[in-house]
Amino acid sequence: MVQCLNTMGSFHCGPCPPGYEGDGRTCTQSDICATNNGGCYPLATCSSSPVCGGYLTGPAGSFSYPNTPGHDEYDHMVSCAWVIRIETNKILRITFPFFDLESSTNCNFDFLQIHDGDSASDYIIGKYCGQNNPQELYSSHNSLYFWFRSDHSVSAGGFTVAWQSHDPVCGDELTAPYGNIKSPGYPGNYPPSRECYWTVTVDSGLLITFAFGTLHLEHHPDCNYDFLEIRDGLLPEDPVLGKYCSTATPAPLQTTGPNAWIHFHSDFTVSDQGFHITYTTSPSDPGCGGTFTNSEGIIISPNWPNDYAHNRQCVYLIRLPVGEKVALNFTHMNLESHGSCSFDYVEVSFHTLLRVVLLSSSQSSVIPIQMEIVFKGLDQYSEEEKLQRLLKLKLRYFTPREVANLMGFPQSFSFPKHIYTKQQYRVLGNSLNVDVVARLLQLLVS
């Protein structure tokens, strides 16, 4: 194992292990015959025995069998294993610069088998043979186990495996009407110390249903170790639909709107098989959400003028050509009253700029006010161009940090790295109260 020490602006690594050459950061197998004829008499023939198996480390490197694949053929009746291990918070990217093994159905004769971990008992990622270079692959852990075996008959040119360390990528933003979500490494055990976030955003007017195919997580009565959490919305503050930390088959879950947020956490010790969940979509109540592209129209709550249903999120999207304005005129409003609109409410999204919480029926004086919301397709512009365009419209552009300041957040407050800019505005929008809205609107028109 090569030890590396960080220095000011650089690092220094120790020597490569016997049989390998390089700077310590990258180690490749060496051919002892390439230097001074391997120490043999100059007129003698040097033959280097291929290095079969070993324990490898470092952020990048390669190994081959035999030493010069493509020029020599590997021996018969060989069985050897390599383990690559890197930093605990990294994963491995594997490529195959050269690959030539005896072809056979199901690779039963000569093969290279790769396990997602550091032993032969870990999950098998793949079993390879033939002349086609396997596709690049990624580990879910910080180590991989390679087993090469040849039988008693046909041999071929061998293989070269190259590796690089990468930061793990865990989670996704899903928009398809159906799909599946798996823990990293599934169906093998999930790795330790991993934070994974998925968001599911489907068309307005649809609900999302989650079904559990597999759920095997480290058990804890309060889910303080490993857990899977599903929330009814796109934010970590939205209501929890379910939180799991055991081996079970939970009943299906359904959202109240077209969005969901999934968080998987594993600690640094015990792991298990993980989870595999699928999601599908179905229509919500008639009139609950939709996309509107006409130059004018009417939006009503579900079942209007009768009472709307409980536990619903209805998302209405007004989408007009770039450059056009949208004027909203609220003619009727009768919602459950609450000082900060935490129960039933209507929100108007100022695209990625600001979310304004409209007051409920107890503040009926706002209903006759027409609110002009200007949408200029700002996502295609840089932050500076956005600001200039908004200044021309005599509107004030607030960054998430400025909005947080107005809301009284401490200066030490910052968003987690996985929260994108749009999600930051959504987080702030879901936290706005009446006083903050009034101050923001006052600044907008000043």
Image: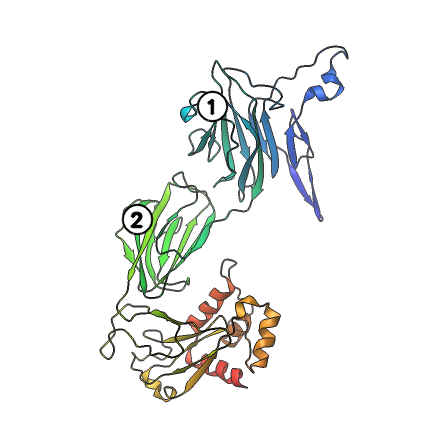
> Residue 185 versus residue 433: which sits nearer the camera?
185
User: In x, y percent, where is residue 381?
Assistant: 58, 68
Which secondary structure lies at badge 1?
A: loop
Q: Which residue is mark 2?
A: 212
Res 388 → quadrant: bottom right
User: In x, y percent, where is residue 228?
Assistant: 37, 51
Marking on residue 381: none
> Residue 387 versus residue 25: which sits nearer the camera?
387
Q: Is residue 217 visible?
A: no
Which secondary structure lies at badge 2?
A: strand
Res 190 → quadrant: top left
Q: Is residue 56 visible?
A: yes
> Residue 277 versus residue 158: which sits nearer the camera?
158
What's the amino acid at mark 2? Phe
Residue 36, compared with residue 422, is above or below; it is above
Residue 269, compared with residue 394, is above or below; it is above
Total labels drawn: 2
User: In x, y percent, where is residue 424?
Assistant: 49, 66
Q: CA distance from mark 2 to mark 1?
A: 39 Å
What residue lies at 73% left-to-right and 10% top-to-bottom?
44
Q: Which is in the foreground here, disc 2 or disc 1?
A: 1
Give the image's coloring scheme: rainbow
What residue lies at 54% left-to-right and 43% top-to-bottom?
90
Residue 390, compared with residue 144, is above or below; it is below
Q: Which residue is mark 1?
A: 103
Image quarter where the C terminus lies is: bottom right
Residue 382, compared with residue 99, is above or below; it is below
Res 186 → quadrant: top left
What's the amino acid at mark 1? Ser
